Amino acid sequence: MLPWAYQAFLCVLVITARFAIPQLRPQSERSSKAFSRFLLYSVAVATFVILLNSMLIRGGATMGSILGFSLYEEGLFFGVRTASRLLLLTYAVLLFFVSTPLKELIRFLQQKGLSPSFTLILLLTLHFLDHLPARIHQIFLAQQARGAPVDAGIVSRSRALLSILSPLVLSSIVESIDRGTALELRGFLNRPQDARLITQPTAERNALTIILLAGTIILLLATLSRWLLG
Amino acid sequence: MSKSIRQRIAEELTGPALPFVAFCIALNLTAGQVTAALKIPLYLDSIGTILVAVLVGPWAAVLCGSTANLLAAAFGNPTMMFFIPVVAVIGAFTGVVAKLGWFRKWYLVCLGGILQGILAAMVSAPISAYLFSGVMMAGTDFLVLYFRSLGNTLMNSVLYQGLASDPADKLVSYLIVFLLVRNLPQRLLARLHGAANLRTPDPTP
Amino acid sequence: MAARLEISSLSLRYSQGAPLAISALSLTIPEGSCVGIVGPTGAGKTTLLHCLAGILGKHHPGIVLSGRLQIGDVAYEGFPRDILFPTVGLVLQDPFVQISGVRDKVYEELLFTIENTGRGGEGSDFLIQSVLRNLGIEHLANRKPTTLSGGETQRVALASILIAEPSVLLLDEPITALDATAQAKLRAILKGLHGKTTVLLTDTQIDFPLSVCDEIVILDQGKMIVAGKPRQLLSDGHDLANVGGWKRWGRITARLKDLSHEASREAPRILKALGLR
């Protein structure tokens, strides 16, 4: 089999795994939408990459034509290899994250020795991500009510950008100082290293999932090393 | 005796710095909402990293940028994970120039932004070229195609695309941060490790 | 267990050459009592509390600080940060920032503080339930902290500090975001703490401290102007125009004095209802 076939096969395997193995299914509505959105987007990009390379890299037999542009065999194989490598790398990462709740990942990292400070940063980031969009919207409306030129030319809109970012950053510094102070007041910085900051329950494990994942990783490593070694 | 990396990180990550770094990570991920609402063609996906570099320190900035990219990958943009070395360099470089006092003068901020952009383009080019063959699923892919059609190698095409867009993008981000931090009250800044980066040193008595 | 708090000649500037934020303040608070620090904005009330909690100390960059703190039998030089917790507990003015943001339930918020003290274990549940009960918030145990109202958040923030069993409790303008009902609940909680914890609270208005505090200290521009028991303070004829509510209380006590001169039976009842025993 040619290298591009390996990669294309792995792509199909990864996508199939997401739908076929229950434990690899997205853990939340947001993850599911993210995966579906990315899948559609990446298929469009992959098609574009394959077509473009087929037209630009002229070698081998002519495979056909689209809108008067000929498609060449060498370009097609190169396009498929490029697109499948891109998709494989991105799908593998995406599949990992959509099937693993972030809090469980943070809990796992904490167990493996991640410091309480860094665990706190990760957890607080998730907290801020929930509240920041609403705060940005509130500041946007407040500035608009003051006459900030949100619909004018690019220069005026750039000034409006500062009038939104400035109160956002200033209020965040004030809140961070207060929050940090509150954490110090509750003794967080002297917290014993072994005290767990997050105690999310562990998800169920499945032998089949582990075998399939391990097999996929081995195939991926084999493909990568074959590509790197030429 | 020089301090270990762990000591330096602990010095930077004091109580107030922890929530501030978390906020800046979230800002990296959501600043695009502000620019989208105002229809401004900027990403501002490093603005939080630059803020941390200036107000806290380089190690905290490396942490901020890396974590933001990791979370961006987790939230549906998996290519971001592979560019963690780029944001780490952004954080480290910005932290160093901030310590040198470059964020006290606008012309040094401009110089820093352009240099940062060049550095970011140089670090991201090999990642983009070798891992993704120059295809990033973004509008800049057309720029890469254009440079390739002129006869350049893939690596050079990706580098030229980066040099065409990154210095301008980083210059704007640096200027925005400069304008944001220059009027912050010293009493607030004093609680963060990087306060001295913005304070003009007292003249020798 | 409550402890006596003694502040000796505390002076503080935020930086060399800056004006004094606190000027030669000396204060003794008997164990188990409740003292109110009242003054206008910028008087130095929050600065004082931050000093006592160890937030502003000699470790703070640029600070110029002198003075001595004694809590019970232990003297603290330089107002150190780490040592003061959990002996001193401070509830900040904005209770929302006191919530850690990393725990999904109020119960776990309280557990967070216990873990920080290194005392997590079998007794934690009993301690948490007891604090929740004392503050009347047992029904909030399984609620998400970010969904609570202002008054509820205030009580959870207070619980998150009380769970560490501080000897001294500091409250920075605790009634700012509270309605009358929530203020009444807080008043009842503070009266319940009397004798068990030494409490120091601040406010810009004198009304709330008059109703809960054993002693009131008036602070202005970093200096102590006057101190005394509430009723004595009101009847001593001070001119404190900068203290919120002072003029109103002055008129009330003047009228009550007239009533008592008329030997009215109403005067003692009114004084008792106003908490000016």
Image: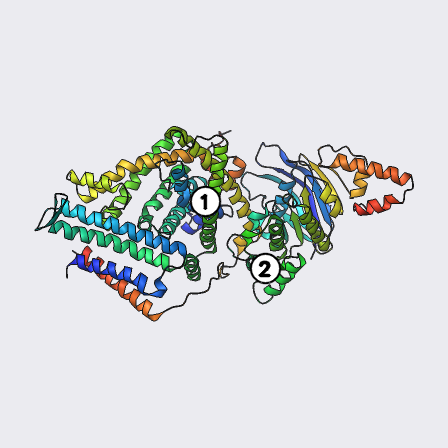
Q: Amino acid at mark 1?
A: Pro
Q: Amino acid at mark 2?
A: Ala
What subunit carries mark 2? C
Relative side of B162 to B2, left or right: left
Is residue A65 or residue A25 the one in the foreground?
A65
Instruction: List x then y, in percent, for residue A132.
Output: 47, 45
Q: Residue beneath label 1, please?
A: A133
Q: Is residue B165 visible?
A: yes
Relative side of C158 to A69, left or right: right
Q: Residue at x 30, y 41 (%)?
A: B120
Is residue B19 or residue A82 the one in the foreground?
A82
Q: Residue beneath label 2, please?
A: C141
A195 is higher (above) or lower (below) than C180: below
Q: Residue at x 60, y 55 (%)?
A: C160
A195 is higher (above) or lower (below) than A132: below
Q: CA distance from mark 2 to mark 1?
A: 28 Å
The tally of labels here is 2
Q: Is residue B58 visible?
A: no
Instruction: List x then y, in percent, for residue A193.
Output: 49, 59
What subunit carries mark 1? A
Displayed quadrant of residue B51? top left
Q: Residue furthest left?
A: A61
Instruction: List x then y, in percent, for residue A78.
Output: 16, 51
Task: Give the position of the N terminus of chain C as an image quadrant.
Answer: bottom right
Instruction: List x then y, in percent, for residue A165.
Output: 45, 37
User: What crowding class fits label 1: few (fewer than 14 Cα within 10 Å), some (14-19), or many (20 or more)?
Assistant: some
Relative side of B153 to B163, left or right: left
